[in-house]
Image: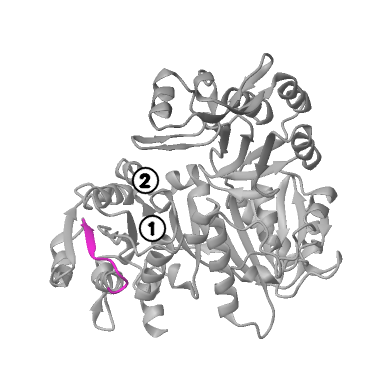
Amino acid sequence: MKFGPVPTDEAEGAILAHAAHLPDGRLRKGTRLATTELERLRAAGIGEVIVARLEPGDIDEDAAADRLAAALMPPGLRLSEAATGRVNIYAVGRGIVRFDREGLKQVNRIDEGITLACVQHNQLVEDGDMIATLKIIPYGICEDVVEAVEQQAVGAPVLGFHRLTARPFALIQTRMEGMKPSVLTSTEKVTKQRLNQLGCALVDSRVVAHEAHAVAEAIEAAREHGAEAILICGASAISDRRDIVPMAVKQAGGKVDRLGLPADPGNLLMSASLDDMPVIGMPGCARSPRLNGFDWVLQLVLAGLPLDDDEIADMAIGGLLMEIASRPLPRRMVEQRRSDTIAIGGVLLAAGMSRRMGDENKLLAAIDGVPMVRHVAEAMIAGGIRELVVVTGHQADAVTAVLSDLEAPGIILRFVHNADFADGQAGSVAAGVAALSNDVSGALIALGDMPFVLADLVAEMIQDHSGLGDHEMRISFPVFEGRRGNPVLWGRGFFKALAGLSGDIGGRRILAENPAAVNSISWTDDSIHNDIDTGDDLRRHLRG
């Protein structure tokens, strides 16, 4: 390529190297000088310009950039159309960027006119984030150089992009004497926030004794609840392969692959596997939302990358996280905050026949002078439900009479009668969901015979569910001592399926088909399991 000053009269067809500011406007650098441009330059009294001219065997900067980007990048990424010799490369989906360090250096050594820059190795990026940029410095470059770079890329691209695949997770925490319950609650919330940011669901959460057999049993229970990856946060840090958590993994039939991580915070992490399912022993720092080595391991697991010795050893570079802001989260994830509480409607199932109570309708039985079903309705409203649909059936007029005065400013109360109430609960669920207004994002479905569910639980479920980025496609359950209970909060994405239910199956079939949609919310007592079925149940609770 020729480069330098030439008389304006001899510059036709050349590339303007520097912008020219003329009385009638600006000529941008890189402009191909044709008759019109030359006349403007002469009119401005400019007799000489600095230009570039391609010679035989040269390739235009944009053509070279397009060609090299196609050769150096793996499929599945988005490449911009070359302009001013630059092609930008963008992520398609959330994933991890990785590169061949030596290969990248070799590309940048071949010719000073070619530069390729990318984000850090193992950087987590969001859909649409720029992950690399290729720039041709001169206005044209020799084809021999382009071919040399293409040859360097033969066999494998210098850059790789590994999309994250969401998994349903389980969290197992161990408890020792004297441990504050607030520590366990906080750990679950922080863990759930981490998983939600990565598009993953916490489908099971339980607290067990700090004993190997108890943890091993919890691992098996978590698998039965649909978990495809397990996180274990011990009451005490893992300090040896013979410690409680590693031994529990072995008892469950798993294998400990690695104990220790060259990242700080995050040293005391255990990576293990059970029938190809990842099991991660969390370091104590994972109780905090601040970036630590546990975040890196989570991302690698979701990217499907093996946690072998080389991979873990490579974390040492930039692993001193307390001192180096290495591999931060994408800006959109950093800026993400817990969402404002969304509009959740309530469905109160109050249509049952109370067959096991004899002639008495249990929903109307008084507890502390208040009908049972009213206890539930009041808890839902006090917990934040502003639109409540009550589904009636058996003795509909009597049930309506004890609830009708609950409507108040800001509270919508609607009664829907299920004429087929004798056929089972599913029809009542369908009728209740169908009666909700179109602007609710989810439905908290409660049972009229569970009078010990408190407003605090309803409020916690609404707040927790609201924080899920994909809340309309999630199902939130309260959990106590490993057992799921009621009420259940269904995202709007399941309304159509719920409205189509019949018989007495309820939502169990839908849940079985969508195990990864479950959002587990730990609760503090067994009120979520306590319903009133018989007169003996009622008398026992009244005595209690």
**Can you identify the residue that label 2 sits on?**
493
Percent across and percent down for residue 199 are 52, 50
Identity of the residue drawn at 63% across and 31% down: 138
Instruction: Tell us which disc is closer to us: 1 or 2.
Output: 2
Viewer-side residue, 289 vs 128: 128
Identity of the residue drawn at 55% across and 38% down: 90
Using residue 417 as the reference point, say whether residue 218 is left or right of it.
Answer: right
**Can you identify the residue that label 1 sits on?**
489
Rendering quarter of residue 150: top right
Percent across and percent down for residue 170 are 61, 57
Sort mark 1 into few (<14), some (14-19) or many (20+) by Cα contacts within 10 Å.
many
Q: Amino acid at mark 2?
A: Gly
Instruction: Determine the secondary structure under disc 2.
Output: helix
Using residue 402 as the reference point, say whether residue 99 is left or right of it.
Answer: right
Picture layout, residue 490 above or below residue 19: below
Residue most extreme to the top = 56
Picture layout, residue 321 above or below residue 146: below
Does residue 45 belong to the magenta stretch?
no
Percent across and percent down for residue 183 are 59, 77
Sort mark 2 into few (<14), some (14-19) or many (20+) by Cα contacts within 10 Å.
some
Q: Which residues are magenta?
A: 382-392
Does residue 384 belong to the magenta stretch?
yes
Viewer-side residue, 501 vs 457: 457
Picture layout, residue 443 above or below residue 172: above
Q: Amino acid at mark 1?
A: Leu
* Res. 256 in view: no
Picture layout, residue 277 above or below residue 341: above
Viewer-side residue, 83 vs 419: 83
Identity of the residue drawn at 34% across and 49% down: 492
